[in-house]
Image (cartoon, rainbow, N blue to C red):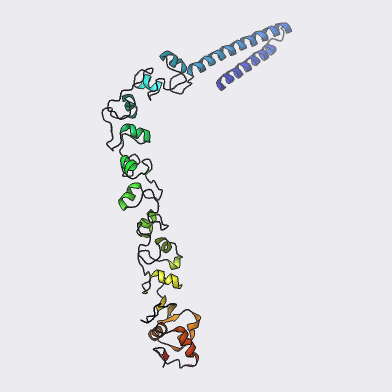
Amino acid sequence: MKKQESIQYILSIAAIVIIVAIVLLLPNMSVSDTDDLAGQAIAKTKSKIDKTDMKTSALTKASKDSDSDGLTDAQEKTYKTYPDDADTDDDGLTDYEEVRTYKTDPLVADTTDSDSDGLTDALEKKYKTDPENPDTDGDGLTDGKEVSLGTSPTDADTDDDDITDYDEYKTYKTDPLDDDSDNDKLTDGQEVSFGTDPENPDTDGDGLKDHDEIFVEGSDPLDPDSDDDGLTDNEEATSAVDRRTNSNDSDTDDDGFTDKEEVDAGSNPADASDTLCVDSDADDPNPEKVKGTVEGGLWKPSNAKYTKVTDVCNSATELKEYICENSYTAYFETIDCTTFDPNSVCVNGECV
């Protein structure tokens, strides 16, 4: 249409130019003569425009393809196919493919299925499969089934994830068109290899994706608490940087207390100097864990009520033994350490 309008525009300009030329070049002509010449020029221009319109219309009509099958409506008329139906005989091949590619009859559906795979022999040509072999790529799915699933009947592993289309569809229930069905950055093939669930991005439900457990944290994607310290792998991986623990080591700072024990008591499980003291009395059914730090080789309890004990008991070993093996309450109720000799030692609950 735009081409037609351009031609009309050019011809109109030409007519105007002719009229101007007549006026300028033939000044001695009468007005009536000039009008006659102008009229003749306009008539000729209109005639040319009409002819152009007819040719453009004819070209448009000749190239029209109502069903977009590759054959023009005029060609469809020649072949006696339906111009508004891309597959006149409904055999799965377009009229164009039948006429131009496979040289088959577009008016007669080819229902022959030599290998009984659900694809007619005509469609086997289209998909480049073997009409004598129901499973061209040997993956366990028939060619017809692959076409219906959208997988390639000539490629046993359509998404290249190292699992055959059959195993994805039948065994693992994964997407044979997506190499990472659960979007956890592990291919379905890798998940099968690692034993994780290719349909679950976090197989053990600890809050860390399988990929991150294997390639970032080095933890077990099948165990929510890889080191059995009472903290999940995710809790260990997402703790503050200065308190970050190792999900494969139950005692990250090697201070003798599990990461969980330190977290519960409020000490830093990633810093051996910030550790605990445990009441080791055999007669105490609930040993108490006291948060403290090691300063200058001495263990110092963090709780303010033990400050005076630190002043009195100058030996780390003796201090630890005294605090951990005796009742804190009884000790502070019965002994006034503020008046005791700083050089004394703590033995069996008494400062001597």
Residue situated in front as seen by the camera: 113 or 316: 113
Q: How many marks?
A: 0
Q: Position of residue 248 (x, y in %)?
A: 35, 64
Q: Position of residue 167 (x, y in %)?
A: 31, 42
Return the residue found at the far right. Answer: 31
Quadrant of the rendered image containing residue 315: bottom left
Q: Is residue 307 above or below residue 102?
A: below
Residue under the image location 60 percent in, 18 percent down = 10
Q: Quadrant of the N terminus?
A: top right
Which sits in the foreground, 262 or 173?
173
Say left or right for 5 vs 330. right
Can the viewer see residue 30 in this picture? no
Q: Quadrant of residue 41?
A: top right
- For the residue pair 147 and 155, the one nearer the viewer reads as 147
| Residue 229 against residue 164 in the figure, above or below | below
**Residue 104: image x %, image y %?**
34, 19
Residue 48 drawn above or below residue 130: above
* Residue depicted at x 40% and y 21%: 96
Q: Is residue 144 visible?
A: yes
Using residue 32 as the reference point, say whether residue 52 is left or right of it. Answer: left
Q: x and y percent of residue 216 in the render?
A: 38, 58
- Which residue lies at the image location 44% right of the left edge and 71% below the top edge? 264
Q: Residue at x 70, y 8 (%)?
A: 35
Which image quadrant: the C terminus? bottom left
